[in-house]
Image (cartoon, rainbow, N blue to C red):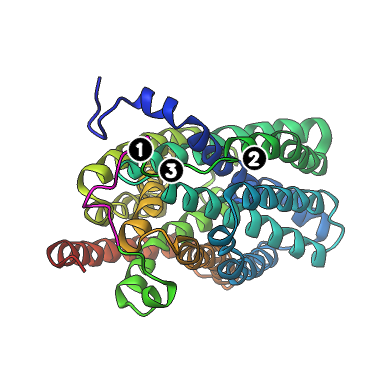
Amino acid sequence: MSTPGGTDGAGSFILANGRWLGGAFLLCLCSSFGQTFFISLSGGDIRRELGLSHGDFGLLYMLATLASAVTLPFLGRAIDRFSTRYVAAATILGLAAACLVMATVPSVPLLLVALYLLRLCGQGMMSQTAFTAVGRWFLAQRGRAVSYVTIGYQAGEASLPLIFIAMVGLVGWRGSWFASAAFLVAFGLPVIYALVSRERDPQGTGGTASPKTAAGDRQLYEVMRSPSFYLLCAGVVAPPFIVTTIFFHQIYLSNLRGWPVELFASGFVLMSAATAACALTCGWLIDRYTAVRVLPFFLLPLTFACFVISLVVSPVAVFIFMGLVGISNGFAATLFGALWPELYGVRHLGAIRSVVLSMLVFGSALGPGLTGFLIDRGVSYPLQIAAMGCYCLAGAIVLSLWSQRHSRSGA
């Protein structure tokens, strides 16, 4: 039975490309150890043991993430020079080392080092490796492939927080970080290395490139001279800035509203389910209409999510927010995997994606630090979130105009 997204069914597509999809899927899942939602699970313990305020911890987190954003454009080019298996193995080992540093952190300076390594290897290089590889491995069915791989993020979001919290009850928060390092070395490294040890021929089982996805290979300096590139980045940086900020300060928002601190954690499963469903839908839409045509819509759910969580006091607002964020995340994750190779080709994709990803990391770094600074100075946090919603709405309008112009002119 055929599917709208391609000439073969989803099952046969996955079977034919299982090793590459599985390897990239696991890279996305293992990136969870360097993502905000996972690190923040230890935030209370870290602040308590090291005597840090919300603003202090937010500043350290911002500095570490900014440092990773600066490093990423240089380190991220490795995927253009070395095979996927070597870059993946080095990144996994780096992330495991970061978990060990976090497990033993005795002071603020080493906490900064731990956060830097977690953000660089987890949020940065794991994602960079997964999506650059998939962008090269698939052409005509790139949207579908990216959508399957993206679900690795949701698998991590849905499972790892609950597992980590259970582990904390057994071995403490430091012991849980030791266990995270052991998981990466004992399971992640050998399995992912085996799956991606052979590169995929994009002209093979995935079919040949269709005209809508074929792109001239643009070099990094050409891309960075284009005003459109910065316009696109201004739009795509919104989700990491906003979602990271709200998740990082979720305890503060819960205290403001009088919500139980477990409320946000209970909404992660809903968010993950919505993200997975919308990632698959977006993959089909991209293969049918192109990433450029789908682009304007991904900010609209996030717009409404910001307005709901900033204006609605009832606990139900959290579940509406998480559902809408899941929709936006699903579209964004698949779009970001398919948009850049569609626009700029794949030969220099690692260098281009590393610059884009550094901007996304910069946005995720700026959010917690900036909002923590404003909170410490008495600026209403709900008002800040409402302003983020206004930014998303403006971004959706601008991207819609750009998409229409690009589709008409092809440039």
Q: Of 185 and 174, which appears nearest the observer?
A: 185
Q: Of 339 and 274, which appears nearest the observer?
A: 339
Decide if residue 276 is in sight here: yes
Residue 331: within the magenta? no
Q: Main secondary structure of the magenta part?
A: loop
Range drawn in magenta: 204-215
**183 left or right of 14?**
right
**Kind of residue at badge 1:** Gly
Label 2 to label 1: alpha-carbon separation? 22 Å
**Which label is found at residue 206?**
1
Residue denoted by label 2: 193
Q: Residue at x 70, y 33 (%)?
A: 187
**176 left or right of 356?**
right
**Which label is found at residue 201?**
3
Residue 156 coordinates in the image, percent (x, y): 57, 37
Residue 208: within the magenta? yes
Label 2 to label 3: alpha-carbon separation? 18 Å
**308 left or right of 96?**
left
Q: Residue at x 74, y 47 (%)?
A: 96
Callout 2 environment at 10 Å: few (<14), some (14 to 19), or many (20+)? some
Q: Quadrant of residue 410?
A: bottom left
Asked whether the residues under the numbered discs 2 and 1 touch, taking CB atoms below 8 Å apart as contact, a structural biologist would say no
As drawn, 47 above or below 184: below
